[in-house]
Image: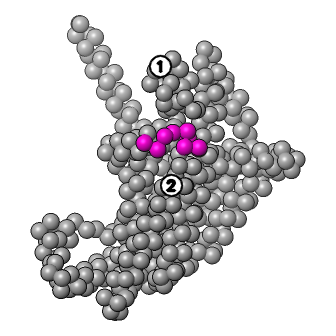
Amino acid sequence: MTSKEISGGIIRAVLTLTALVLLLFVLSKISTIIVYLLVSVVIALIGNPIVEFLKKRLKFKNTLAVITTLLLFIGLIIGFVMMFVPLIISQSHNLSLLDTNSIQKNFNTVLLQVNTYLANHNIDILALMEKADLTSKLNFNFLPTILNSVFGVISNFGMGLASVSFISFFLLKDKIRFQYIFRKVLPDNHEEKILTSVEKINHLLARYFSGILLQLFIVFILYFIVLLIFGVKSAFTIAFICAILNIIPYIGPLIGTVLAVILTMMGLLGTDFRTEILPTSLYVLIGFTIVQMIDNNVSQPIIFSNSIKSHPLEIFLITLISGFLFGITGMILAIPTYTVLKVIAKEFLPENKVVKILTKDI
């Protein structure tokens, strides 16, 4: 290899790295637009079956079907905001969920009461926690972060709603035109395979995202009922936070259950620990465990097995690996990303033995 070739390779590497840095910089600056686009794509995936239903069954024109579908989504969003957000805000203030210091103080009070109760049974929980250095590792910042993120989205509600509605409208209305343009830029020798992959991905992800929304709603309702039955204060907000955490596969429900027990105990401060706080917390723990059993044996199998055609063990391993490699974000994105890769592999590597086994139901 000559010095000229080496210098040329170095220059190409530097230019490539510079282009990558610039791309990342631009993406960071337009991150809000990217979020709007991704949300619009999800809405288009969920809304497409509704548009097709309105066109085929009710004989709506394409534009009218799209407008009706978007109005339905907008109505649901505005209804949620008007009905529930004021309730969440008021209950969050009652629980001091927007003040990390108050959360920490209430948690320490609960911990002292638990320790006093267990000390009477010769168990020193504070000593165990100090030995494990657990109290210093507890960080309640994620509670106000979750709520503030929701409120932040709502504060930019007008701009976001208008942008997402505009993008979603054209994604649904001009779907055929976008497909035509997409066809034109595809290489001729792979056009059929790519189009088949896109169609399957669109179908599977639409069912997946619809199923996720339904799952979260069902879990939220069940959590809310459990908390109402046992008279827990701020039941709506606690159920809402725990349902949102359910988006994180496997770990989210566990965190939500522990969090619900802690918030229940914090809400009962000032009452007798042995006769009020402890029994109610145990009932909430049992209730949330039952909800998770229902979710794990009914909701999730329907979503994973029927929607994306993957075995639960397969999904568990992919989610676990993604969690180790990319953290919580990886766990959330693992299933839709894996579904896309499976569809592409089936179209382009149909004779591969591993691909055949993993994609036999697609």
Return the mark for residue 297: 2
Label 1 Cα crowd, 10 Å radius (few <14 / some 14-19 / many 20+): few
Q: In which image quadrant can residue 137 be found?
A: bottom left
Look at 42% across and 61% down and name the residue there: 253
**Residue 287, x across and y down, in percent:** 45, 72
Mark closer to the observer (1, 2): 2
Do tag 1 and tag 2 residues touch (Cβ < 8 Å)?
Answer: no
Query: Which amino acid is tagged 2?
Result: Asn
Whether residue 308 appears in magenta in the rendering, the answer is yes
**Residue 288, x across and y down, in percent:** 44, 69
User: Can residue 102 be seen?
Assistant: no
**Residue 318, x across and y down, in percent:** 40, 41
Which residue range is magenta in the image? Answer: 305-313
Query: Which amino acid is tagged 1?
Result: Asn
Would residue 236 appear left or right of 321 to someone viewing this image?
right
Look at 23% across and 85% down and name the residue there: 117
Return the mark for residue 352: 1
Look at 35% across and 27% down and name the residue there: 15
Q: Quadrant of the N terminus?
A: top left
Would residue 147 appear left or right of 204 to someone viewing this image?
left
Q: Is mark 1 on a helix, strand or loop?
A: loop
Of all residues, the one furthest to the top in this rendering is: 2
